[in-house]
Amino acid sequence: MDADTGLVHTVTCTPASVADVSQVDTLLHGKEKTVHGDAGYTGVGKRGEHGGRKVTWDIAERPSTTRPCATAE
């Protein structure tokens, strides 16, 4: 979606067997400065098709890589 207007500019539908990260190239229009994504997009910045993109990748970590918060007792 567009960060300024909040409008969705692209939608891609695939079967559940298709990885989210494989669809990024079809979702971006080339004018992005920052790209936000959930953990399904981990590693997107390392993929060859995005090597020339001048964007900041803001991708959530997988839950298995984060430590639980300490609880106050």
Image: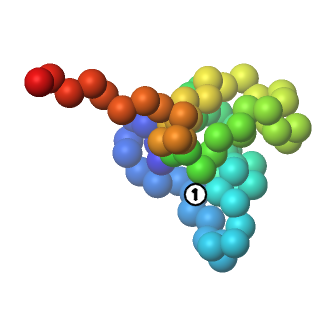
Q: At which x and y percent is residue 2?
A: 47, 42
- Looking at the rendered image, the quarter that the C terminus falls into is top left
- Residue 5 against residue 21 in the figure, above or below: above
Task: Give the residue drawn at x 41%, y 51%.
Answer: 7
Q: Where is residue 52 in the image (x, y as percent from the top left)?
A: 83, 28
Q: Is residue 10 shown left or right of residue 25?
A: left
Answer left or right for 27 relative to 67.
right
Query: Which of the two residues, 66 or 57, is positioned nearer the viewer here?
Result: 66
Identify the residue at horizontal 14%, vertical 23% (top origin): 72
Q: Which colour scheme is used?
A: rainbow
Instruction: Identify which residue is drawn at 36% across, 32% down.
Output: 68
Label 1 residue SS: loop
Picture quadrant where residue 30 is located: top right
Residue 26, placed above or below residue 36: below
| Residue found at x 59% / y 50% | 40
Q: Position of residue 32 (x, y in %)?
A: 61, 33
Q: Residue furthest bottom?
A: 15
Residue at the disc numbered 1: 10
| Count of numbered labels shown in the rendering | 1
Image quarter for residue 58? top right
- Residue 20 place in picture, x, y as percent: 65, 57
Q: Is residue 36 visible?
A: no
The amino acid pointed to by label 1 is Thr
Q: Residue furthest front?
A: 73
The furthest residue to the left: 73
58 is higher (above) or lower (below) than 14? above
Regarding residue 22, the answer to whether it shows in the image is yes
The foreground one among 9 and 63 is 63
The crowd level at tag 1 (other Cα within 10 Å; few <14, some 14-19, many 20+) is few
